Amino acid sequence: MIAKLSTLVLVVLVAACGAHMPPKELVDARAAYDHAAAQEATSLVPAELHIAKESLDVAEKKFADDPDSQDVRDSAYVAMRKAQRAEALGTVAAATDSKHTAEHERTRTQAEIIAAQQGKLANAQDQIAHEHANLVQQKQLTEQERQARLEAEKKAKDAMDALSKSLAVKADTRGTVITLSGGVLFATGQATILPGAQAELNQVADALKTQAEHHFTVEGHTDNQGTDAINNDLSNRRANAVRDYLIVRGVASEAITAQGFGSTRPIGDNHSPEGRAMNRRVEIVVDRAVTAASS
Amino acid sequence: MTRLRIGFLAAVIAAPLAACGGAPKPEARMASSEGAIRGAQEAGASNVPQATLYLQLAQEERDQAVQLVKDEKNHRAEMMLARSEADAELAVALARAAHATHEAQEATEQIRDLKEKAQ
């Protein structure tokens, strides 16, 4: 009786082991584990996946030992949660990785932006320095020009002052007028410069060369003796003779013109010998206006 | 021969009995389950939609376990607490995953904005 009963119990147990379908919890746990193991992110947390596997193994063993027990369902439930947990922790690891990557990239990009801005700044500073140097150079040039002009003006004034000590120099509406006596320059009726007048004309030429920005007019004048035709011709030739001489002495030819006025512009009384002597003259006019060609 | 069979039978019958009634109160499990639930709450599981369900399950299972202990079904209580702890730990992991994903997205958006500005 007892032997038969125990045999029956064994048969039932064996039959149960072979034929039992796994409970829903175990089916779910297996699927959850397979799903977790298939995720790429889960490979970042191998320890967590291992725990899930161990947990599933426990449920499988219990199922093998006693398929119907509540313990199988409980441990399968726990195993499923462990698998889900491993998957979630894989997500954490992957997200943390991508955050670090982004932060690293941000640091690098910020450094690139700063470097680019510093480059622009350096360029701008270079440009400013360059422009500043140009400005300083220009200023120096301008100052040098100003100094040179002042020196030239002083030299011109000094020359005219020196000239006025030995010659008749006066200012009128035309400009500065240097008056040379016809008797000193020429023999009567002639337009050839006398050797004795050369020193005086040399002095005039030197003074005119310092007045580089002015134009000069050489004017020939006679007294009223003789015909106008003769006087006009003579005054013209004398003016040109002086012009030619001054050019030979280095005065620029384009800066100097000559003109004869005959007896039309007396400065003395033609009725007296002294007055006529004053009227026989050559005047060199330094024009008041500064020529455009000057610099 | 007969005595051996009687012994075997007794063992077969006694094992399940011992499993049901004789287990000690699952005090250690109760403590670790409570700890896991607190951990889930601290991780912000109640504010994360994906995690809230598992936190609730963990709490319900813990309450059922308390009742099972009162009914002196200590082994069932122990297994219920294992479920509770597993649910609470999943809630923690899901809350962390939501948080980390959000931070990663923010960092990615920041770098995209920065690159747009840089151009």
Image (cartoon, coloured by chain):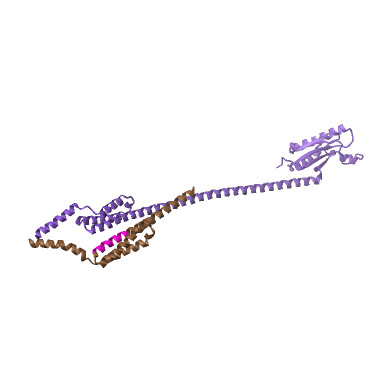
Chain colours: A purple, B brown
| Residue at the image point whose x is 86% and y is 34% from the top | A231
Residue A179, image x and y in percent? 82, 42
Q: From which residue to which does the magenta span run?
A: B75-87
Name the image quarter holding residue B15. Answer: bottom left
**Magenta highlight on residue A86:** no
Residue B86, image x and y in percent? 30, 59
Name the image quarter holding residue B47. Answer: bottom left
Closer to the camera in the image, A155 or B22: B22
Q: Is residue A47 visible?
A: no
How many numbered discs, if any? 0
Question: Extreme left residue here?
Answer: B1
Q: Is residue B10 visible?
A: yes
Closer to the camera in the image, A32 or A238: A32
Residue A15, image x and y in percent? 16, 53
Location of the N terminus of chain B (image quadrant): bottom left
**Left or right, A208 with reference to A103:** right
Question: Extreme top residue here?
Answer: A229
**Magenta highlight on residue B77:** yes
| Residue at the image point whose x is 34% and y is 60% from the top | B56
**Left or right, A14 with reference to A178:** left
Residue A205, image x and y in percent? 76, 40
Closer to the camera in the image, A186 or B25: B25
**Left or right, A290 with reference to A39:** right
Q: Main secondary structure of the magenta part?
A: helix
Residue A14, placed above or below residue A226:
below
Residue A216, placed above or below residue B68:
above
Name the image quarter holding residue A206. Answer: top right
**Left or right, B36 with reference to B21:** right
Closer to the camera in the image, A142 or A259: A142
